Structure formats: structure tokens, C-alpha cells
Image (cartoon, grey):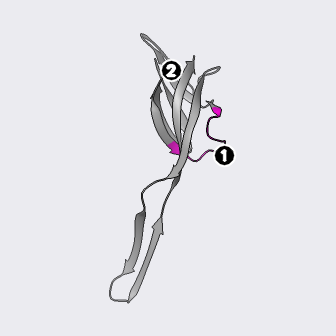
Amino acid sequence: MYAVVRTGGKQYRLGVGDSVKVEKLPDEVGNIVELSQILMVSDGGEVKVGTPLVPGASVKAEIVGHGRNKKITVFKMKRRKQYRRTQGHRQAFTQLKVTEINA
């Protein structure tokens, strides 16, 4: 059984027991969060596709931890104009472990 979930502007294919990094959520470590924006649920042979969401479906996941991804470098330049700008960015994330999928 798996579900396609939308959170943080991205879509993830999740199954029970999967671990995934999503955009930072405001809850504490150890809390259970319920993801309610379910786009699709597959239970073996039966597939439910939402228009756009599947009514009554939810995914429960436990927050394992918070962190920040590796640093990326943002570099802007205009040739022959002596214009250069360098900036770094580290995106915050929340590590989730899926515990339950309700169709």
C-alpha cells in the first residue's frame, strides 16, 4: 500500500515504514503529524485517484528529526560589467517516518 502526498509544494510517494525529508514542519520531534493532502492511494489492486484530493484519506507520520541540507552556492554574473554576486543557502527540512496510511 502506498500514497502520493503533497506537502511543502512537492509530491512524495510514501509507503508504510518509509523515511522521507520534507520541507520544515513546525511540530516537535516525536510528534505524530497527519498529512491530509492525499492525491492518490493504491491498495494492492485498487487505486483511488483524487480530483484533486482523495476524500477521507490521510497519512500519519512520526517526526524523527529536523535539520538543514547541504549548502548550495548561488552565483550571479553579468559578463563584461564587473557584476558578480555570491550567496549561499541551506534549506531546512523535517525527517518523517510513515506509520499509517488510511484510505
Residue 86 belongs to magenta span:
no
Q: Distance between the residues labelled 1 and 2?
A: 26 Å
Secondary structure of residue under mark 1: loop
What's the magenta bit mostly, secondary-structure-wise?
loop
Q: Can residue 53 be seen in this view?
A: no
Give the labeled residue for mark 2.
Answer: 41
Residue neighbourhood size for the residue with mark 2, other residues' Cα within 10 Å, grouped as few (<14), some (14–19), many (≥20)? many
Q: Mark 1 and mark 2 in contact? Answer it, CB < 8 Å.
A: no
Q: Which residue is drawn at 66% across and 42% down?
A: 27
Position of 64 relative to 85 (above/below): above
Q: Residue at x 64, y 32 (%)?
A: 33
Q: Where is residue 68 in the image (x, y as percent from the top left)?
A: 50, 54
Q: Residue 85 carries which label?
A: none
In the picture, residue 31 is in which quadrant?
top right
Name the side, left or right, on which 73 lies relative to 24.
left
Secondary structure of residue under mark 2: strand
Give the labeled residue for mark 1.
Answer: 26
Q: Which residue is drawn at 40% across and 73% down?
A: 75
User: Callout 2, which amino acid?
Assistant: Val
> Considering only order in the chain, which callout, 2 or 1, is on the residue closer to the N terminus?
1
Position of 23 relative to 38 (above/below): below
Q: Position of residue 48 (x, y in %)?
A: 51, 17
Q: What range of the chain is rendered magenta?
A: 22-32
Q: Where is residue 64 in the image (x, y as percent from the top left)?
A: 54, 37
Residue neighbourhood size for the residue with mark 1, other residues' Cα within 10 Å, grouped as few (<14), some (14–19), many (≥20)? few
Position of 90 relative to 61 (above/below): below
- Residue closer to the observer: 32 or 89: 32
Q: Nearer the viewer, mark 1 or mark 2?
A: 1
Residue 25 belongs to magenta span:
yes
- Residue closer to the observer: 22 or 43: 22
The C terminus sits in image quarter? top right
User: Callout 1, which amino acid?
Assistant: Pro
